Image (cartoon, helix red, strand yellow):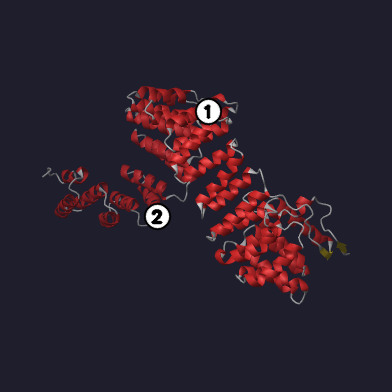
Amino acid sequence: MKTSFARVFSCLAAGVVLAASSLQPQAKDHLSGTAKAAPEEATVIYPALTGDVLFSLMAAEIAVQRRQPGSAFVTLMEVARQTKSREAAQRAFEIANLSGAESQARQALQFWESLTRGTPEHEVPQAYLDLKAGRYEAAKPVFGRLLKSQGKPALLFQHIFAALNGKRLSEAVPFLTAIALPYEGTDPAIDLAVSRLSAQAGDSEKAERFARSAVKASPGSLEVVKQAASGLMRVSPDKALGLVRERLEEVPGDSALRLFYAHALLSLQKTGDFTREAETLSRGSLSGQQWMELGRMAESAQLLPLAKRSYGKVLEAPGTESSREAAYARLGVVSERQGFKEEALGWYSRIQKGDAYVPAKLREADIFMKTGRPDRAIAVLSQATPPDTKGKLAIASALTALLNQADQPWQAYEVMQKAAKEAPEEAEFLYDTAMQAMKVDDMQGVEFYMRKFIALKPESATGYNALGYMLADRGENLGEALRLIRKANSIKPHDAYILDSLGWVHFRLGDDGLAEKYLRESLKAAFEAETAGHLVDVLVHAGKKAEARAEVEAWVEAHPNDPAVRGLREKLGETEK
């Protein structure tokens, strides 16, 4: 049974029927950089469809609403091929076009064009093909007529801009301005898009013209002024600044606009002008967030006293606790930059939670270390209570480094073991724990953590090589050691460290020939004193002491300032020359 539907989705909300204008950020960027609501009465008409096809169409539109344009495209193309529906092919093109899927858009467009040949409707897909091919004069009259037939032309402009997809913009500007002229000053989204594309094409005159039209079409809109100036900044920074200044003359008390102006001045490195604007802002009434923004700009401009005053104002303004924590953190940083370390410690100590907590504890520890108070640094990190796994690992890593510096490797190892237990899936931390186990000669620990690392990172050559070398160096499980190192070599061939391990494990297995071969390959890839020492051991063991002596002297001559290389003479029972 077939049914004819004048409005296929009358049972759905208009926003579900056509949500194409919010499919993809790229589409939004072409217009105004912000999302626009879908047209209230945008619908697609499909004649004489079966219930199964209707269900597929509804599923496609729901996929669009759920930001799944790829799924919607596939469904609509299946319907278009099954029913030869021009409307379904058109809809598939629209979805792919706005989502930036160029190959899919071209596929749907060509199929749509083939279905309309010989009909009055053919001029529309043909116009899109002309547009994509850069035949702008051919496309212009068609799109001019289409735009006149639209109650709200913004969506069609959106499709036009998306179809251009950044191609040959300098040639496209005359076409764009010609079709946009009748709508200039009526819709800021259209004006902003033409301004931005003109700027991208290097046409500063048209970029400024349409930027001003957008501002005029939307009086009082800070967002439009910001977008107009941002687009114009690409080709004419002075004109962009002028646009904002003109608006500021009308509303001098608009702190949000003045902050935007200050940002622009700072980005253009107009330090003097920025300083004057920042001082003007600092005498005004700002929100906590605006004070924070001003503080960050002042800090970036090296205006540290102003930055400190601004962050202090955040603490006085009503706001969320997170803003206060962020202000404490920035006050600590600024105090450090001014050389007031004790003052910085005071600010950092106030931070008890939030995103700034862990960085603050790390900064406290660093200050204590730099001022000769390692015990205080260790105490700060030992008593820290990070809120999440990432923070715990950061604190544990920093504390481990301090304990190692204080010649307390076992305490450092205990810290890492505790953290590793709480984060069993953090592969890199497990690797670091294995390395700390090696420092305290806990070989069982090394093997335990390294095997866990390998289980989590089965495609990492590092784990296989490290464990294989450790086993080889200890002379244990040499068969497994060889297997592990070969696995590492298969993942990362020609690596100097892995080749060194291959040489060393073969030496432990009693094959001096293969050992020498791999060690020489390792030294050819990258010279390392440790690898050179391995080769000396192999050569001496193979009865080639004279050859070993010659090699050592050649290395010493090539690396005269490396004590590790000069120390290789001791392996030959010879003293430093």
* Up/down of 425 relative to 348, above or below: below
Q: In the image, is 576 to the left or to the right of 13?
A: left
Query: Which residue lies most toward the bottom here?
Result: 118
How far apart are the alpha carbons under marks 2 and 1?
46 Å
Q: In the image, is 373 to the left or to the right of 244?
A: left
Percent across and percent down for residue 473 are: 31, 44
Exactly how many numbered labels are in the figure? 2
Q: Is residue 499 visible?
A: yes
Residue at (48% x, 28% y) in the render? 309
Residue at (33% x, 46% y) in the render? 472
SS for callout 2: loop
* Up/down of 132 relative to 55, above or below: below
Instruction: Tell me the amino acid under the disc marked 1.
Output: Glu
Q: Is residue 26 visible?
A: no
Percent across and percent down for residue 497 are: 33, 50
Q: Residues within 10 Å of mark 1 (few under 14, many from 20)?
A: many
Front-most of residues 18 and 156 = 156
Percent across and percent down for residue 538 are: 23, 51
Percent across and percent down for residue 218 are: 67, 47
Quarter of the picture holding the C terminus:
top left
Instruction: Tell me the amino acid under the disc marked 2.
Output: Lys
Q: Which residue is mark 2?
A: 492
* Up/down of 516 relative to 451, above or below: below
Q: Which residue is mark 1?
A: 325
Front-most of residues 313 and 50 = 313
